[in-house]
Amino acid sequence: MAGPDPALLSVNTATVRAQWRMPQIIDALVRHGIRGISPWRDQVADAGLKDTAARIRDAGLTVTGLCRGGMFPAEDRAGRRAALDDNRRAVDEAATLGARCLVLVVGGLPKDRTGRVISKDIAGAREMVRDGIGEVLDHARSAGVPLAIEPMHPMYCADRGCVNTLSQALDLCDELGPGVGVVVDVYHVWWDPQLRSQIERAGDKRLLAYHICDWLVPTTDLLLDRGMMGDGVIDLPLIRGWIGEAGYRGFHEVEIFSARNWWKRDPDEVLMLCRERHQTAG
Amino acid sequence: MAGPDPALLSVNTATVRAQWRMPQIIDALVRHGIRGISPWRDQVADAGLKDTAARIRDAGLTVTGLCRGGMFPAEDRAGRRAALDDNRRAVDEAATLGARCLVLVVGGLPKDRTGRVISKDIAGAREMVRDGIGEVLDHARSAGVPLAIEPMHPMYCADRGCVNTLSQALDLCDELGPGVGVVVDVYHVWWDPQLRSQIERAGDKRLLAYHICDWLVPTTDLLLDRGMMGDGVIDLPLIRGWIGEAGYRGFHEVEIFSARNWWKRDPDEVLMLCRERHQTAG
């Protein structure tokens, strides 16, 4: 299978977050001929929202998503309302940045203010997620910002996201109606026996973003040991083929959290490799 | 909800494998009034198969399963044939021990002889698993040993088991016919939005074993950081209720791999806690 169009490469700013702040990342993407960016809100806030939006616009980059909204479940009404307020702010930031979607990491079991999980009611958490997205949806529609539910790998079910399969995310989309779609991040879904059929089910209308990296064997940390494309076991060209068959024509966004490796490297080397591996392994 | 019948407690020998060898474990289970045991093959081999079978019989323990067969995918025919031979030996050992089932950890992507994953073809690996179980099934039926497919948490898909949901395991059962069922291990399946409906689908006929422990937040190791019942986030009484509604009347087997905690404790304390937590949190 031929390599993908290099113009479709996007880089999630988490990939070089340990080395660079936002202005450096934007400059570097331009320098490396990378045309898409997907920033994290804390990195944007650090550099200033308006400044970042202007820089990205001036650089001619496409904002393939803003990371992240979500984290809806909470122990009480005040906590859930705070999450809704935060999500509405995230929608506004996504609109200011011209982001193609707001990525939702929906949250896991409810936590208390110290971050400790205080409930085992996973069905209840899933209801809070559905209700939370529903509450934010009007605001997102008005702002013209699609909400993109990112199904999370089941190992994150307790503490990050209790929507764990593409099928489950699409059921939510069906229930919530227009303005909500999905992110397919290969790291979260590559193992799913239903992946192909659910990508087909999603179709172009629901597929709002496509994230790539690789699953390493062994994986030494549940959160911060993602691999560069080609270094792991995910058949990326196969999944890219399915995404294409479903009609997706958007960007391929590299998102790598890697405390032991890529966050310790020269970030220019990391971006060069992102370009190269996108072509040879993506 | 009332606690479960203490007579249904079984302990998987991996739970105290760092501290004790097989004869000590058998003696200790009797001492603690625990009536079920589920041994690992290497621990049995270490103590001798016939001696272990005699000791377990004399102690009046029920062998709730033998761990484990499986690991079917391999890089070539010779590797796959070696796996089949090993599985037939495992069936024979299970028969000698009077085990209620042989637990299958089916294997992930094919590896070479050094243990390195050499393929990204997850669909192909799944076919090797189906074919492998099919090849062993006649022998297992003749020996009167049910094969119990254990769906593995998706984080083990690459290297341990590419059957990752109860639904997928039950599809395999449907395809393979009598003599094959499933193990429900809460650690692997607790996150699954379809868990309740798939337990109902399994029914008593397919539910061959029920394994308990807990999912810790945070989890610091993908393999060896399981929690004691009550220390994590799994709603064990809820899942036990579903298992009961499906007609399961078998043992509740505690299986905890815990390098940083339980494997370092006094094993008598571990067994005491298994008994206590089975009642209060199981």
Image (cartoon, coloured by chain):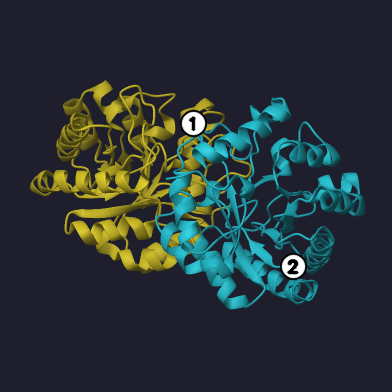
Chain colours: A yellow, B cyan
Identify the residue position indicated by label 2 in the image.
B145
Q: Is residue A220 visible?
A: no
Which quadrant would residue B78 be assigned to in this image? bottom right
Q: Is residue A35 visible?
A: yes
Q: x, y percentage for residue A217?
A: 62, 45
Q: Which mark is residue A73?
A: none
Q: How many marks?
A: 2
First in sequence, mark 1 or 2: give its number: 2
Residues indicated by labels 1 and 2 sit on the same polypeptide chain: yes
A55 on left or right of A120? left
Looking at the image, is B219 positioned above or below residue B129? above
Identify the residue position indicated by label 1 in the image.
B218
- Image depth: mark 1 or mark 2 in front: 2
- Residue at 72% over, 25% down: B266
Q: x, y percentage for residue B187?
A: 54, 46
Q: Secondary structure at mark 2?
A: loop
Q: Amino acid at mark 2?
A: Val
Q: Secondary structure at mark 1?
A: loop
Name the one closer to the observer, B202 or B191: B202
Q: Amino acid at mark 1?
A: Pro
Name the one closer to the observer, A190 or B100: B100
Q: Residues within 10 Å of mark 2 (few under 14, many from 20)?
A: many
Tell me how far mark 1 sits from mark 2, CA to CA.
38 Å
Name the one closer to the observer, A88 or B210: B210
Looking at the image, is A95 positioned above or below residue A180? above
The chain ID associated with circle 1 is: B
- Residue at 70% over, 68% down: B146
